[in-house]
Amino acid sequence: MNKPRYKHNIEPDYNRPLFEIPIDSKRKIINILTLLYGSEVSRQVYPELERIMKVYYAHKTQELIEWEKTFDRSDIFSLEDVILITYGDIVKKNSEKPLKVLADFCRDYFSNSFNTVHILPFFPYSSDRGFSVKDFEEVDPNIGTWADIEDLNYDFKLMFDGVFNHISSKSKWFQEFLNGNPDFKHFFIVLSTKEMISEDHLKLIIRPRTSPLFTEFQTIEGPKLVWTTFSSDQVDLNFHNPKVLLKMIDIFLTYVRRGADLVRLDAVTYLWEELGTDCIHLKQTHAIIKLFRVILDTVAPYVALITETNVPHEQNIQYFGNGYDEAQMVYNFALPPLVYHAFINNNTAYLTKWAQTIQKVSDQTTYFNFLDSHDGIGLLPVKEILPDNEIEKLVYETIEKGGFISYRTDSDGKYSPYELNITWYSAINGNYQHADDTMKLKRYVASRAIAIFFIGIPGIYIHGLIGSENDVEAVLKEKHTRSINREIIDGSVLKEKLDDKSSLISRIVSELNNLINIKKNEKLFHPNCLQIVYNLSEKLFAFERRAEKGDDFVFCVINVTEKRTSFVLPEGLVKTENTFKNLVSGYIMNYKKNEQIEIDPYEIVILKTVKNKSGV
Amino acid sequence: MSFDVKYMLDDTVAVIDIPERLDASCSSELKDKISEVVNKSVYKIIINLAETNFIDSSGLGALVSKISVCKANGGDIRLAAPGKRVLEILQITHLDKVLNYYHDIDEAVNSFATD
């Protein structure tokens, strides 16, 4: 039974019986609310939360309700899942609505490879390219309407951003706070004077930015200092106030109702603030994510949570919870800097060592394997993986290739590099001038192949898909280093280049499309299949994907150097003589144990055993 | 145009004078000049910005075009006498946190002498 295309009605249907919250879900929800607010407040809050869930459920189509009865949670991710990351207005064409232009491009050029579109925040905003949301429930009229989102959802699964950590200082909520409206009095974290927080407490707080933690605003009651983790325009919401939590849950389920199949919890690390702590990854933050998960499991089990936590790898994967009770997917933040490191050093040692620790977590969770996004390449995720001098090398390489660095303030007040701002194409090929376009293409595609075939779900940012180079002019114009990777694309020019089969853009898209289709057509690349990473040579990145049961496997090898080299298949994988098909080249090869297999510069080899007619 | 290079501290430090405008018209020449210096195994480079009041994106790229190799060989690229407008560009791009800058050439040269 296929998932219905129309999942929700515009209006709730109260003629049907109201949803009865299963007792197990109720127990879990009350436990979490008690952890957050204590038992008395928890009892007061629960009925409203139950009402919100019932209202959501009343919007579901009967087809969706019937389909969900057959839905197996281990099918939440599929072989087909490949995510295109894009702004809703990154491609512009004449005066057409950007969301419509995007939908046309997705259908005409990308639907053969991508089944999911992550539309970065498409709400009205005041700064940070959408991440300073003014109204969580509206589509920015400059880019389209909810009908345009619905239209895209007809052919693609959608990922929405839940920017729940903060809200724009220009939002109605914050303006009402400034106006002294009692309903919004406790929506934000407010100090009357700087003396209310000690220097010791301030030093403990881990910051992702160099901007001041508190911003002074003039309110009807005089000046107030308000907690602003990311910028003076992005005011942190106060989840200590259960009304804020209820409001965000309502918005969260509105997103599900509006078509979200995945909800990306932006900057969720910083959700709960508690003086006297570092204010990241607090147990209350994890509890809120678990609450979202229980709600989804209860009323929308086909929707997945993805946490965006740009932090050291070990802390990042804590957001999987026990594999069944928190995020279904986490951004694999260590992957981009390690792949970058491997390609600029022609050496996979660090990548391989880290990758050997990456295992399947559960049949309901997986990694989001991205190399680029609207943000930069995070460095915190590899803090414990790469030595400081190797991180420093990445910084200088990036600058040399025309990229920039974003910094954060450490507890000692010093600045340290936080992320590399550079397009993936410039990162890989930025100073690879001696190579011709074909070699650059091979090198680029080889880097991307790692994220396509690695255990998890691949995601490609639109500028990575078309191989954009750094947009330094935009950085200077917008005075923001992240603008380097956010260039507005002229739709007419893009179309022309995509239609010209000899253009570099067209060749990149075509090569990536081929790889994605190899992945989609081979069931052993399912996110629930296992992965074993091998240390064959420092020039190669090699891993095996196999099902939990049976002997079938695919063996992937990627040469990260411009030199031809060779490898021997790991002993346990081969009998005396085997016949393999290289899924990339299509060649069949007979292989004798311990035989050397040649691999060209930046070649991608994916070997699968060819069975004879009797299946042996 | 051609860039003047002076060698100091027993030829271990190169000082390159930059014109009023560092843009696409001369950035590749600066890159070549820096490469030439580095090819002589001089990895301590001072970029003299005393006369410069404009740098564009290609100019920025040229300034840092050999920073990896300089750093890897115990050297650095340092700036001397950047003006207000140049500093503003460096601050926007956060290059002010990577490239140390000094009031004048003497101060920049001394910074290498005391390393």
Image: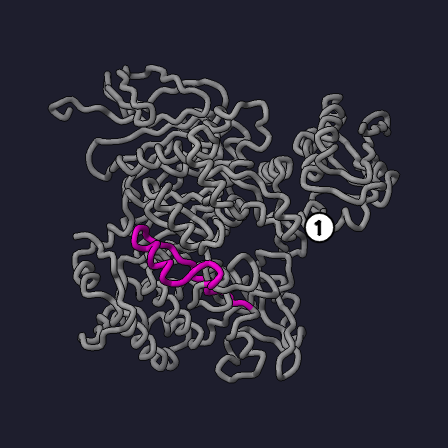
Inspect this view and state whether residue A278 appears: yes
Give the letter of the chain under mark 1: B
- Residue A540 occupies quadrant: top left
Residue at 78% x, 40% y: name it: B21
Does the segment drawn in magenta span residue A164? yes
Instruction: Report the quarter where the C terminus of chain A lies.
Output: top left
Residue A40 in percent (x, y) is at 37, 82
Query: Which element is circle 1 on?
Result: helix
Q: Residue furthest front?
A: A94
Does the segment drawn in magenta span residue B45? no
Horizontal placement of A153 versus B28: left or right? left
Residue A142 in percent (x, y) is at 49, 61
Q: Residue furthest left?
A: A614
Residue at 36% x, 32% y: name it: A543
**Whether residue A22 is situated above or below residue A429 in the rendered picture:** below
> Start and end of the magenta stretch?
A140-168
- For disc 1, the neighbor class at 10 Å (few under 14, some 14 to 19, many from 20) is few
Residue A5 in percent (x, y) is at 25, 56
**Whether residue A185 is situated above or below residue A443 in the rendered picture:** below
User: According to the image, label 1 marks what residue?
Assistant: B91
Residue A414 in percent (x, y) is at 67, 53
Residue at 51% x, 68% y: name it: A134
For this rendering, which residue is in front, B47 or B29? B29
**Whether residue A264 is situated above or below residue A184 in the rendered picture:** above
Q: Look at label 1 and name its amino acid.
A: Gln
Inspect this view and state whether residue A317 appears: no
Horizontal placement of B45 versus A25: left or right? right
- Residue B23 occupies quadrant: top right
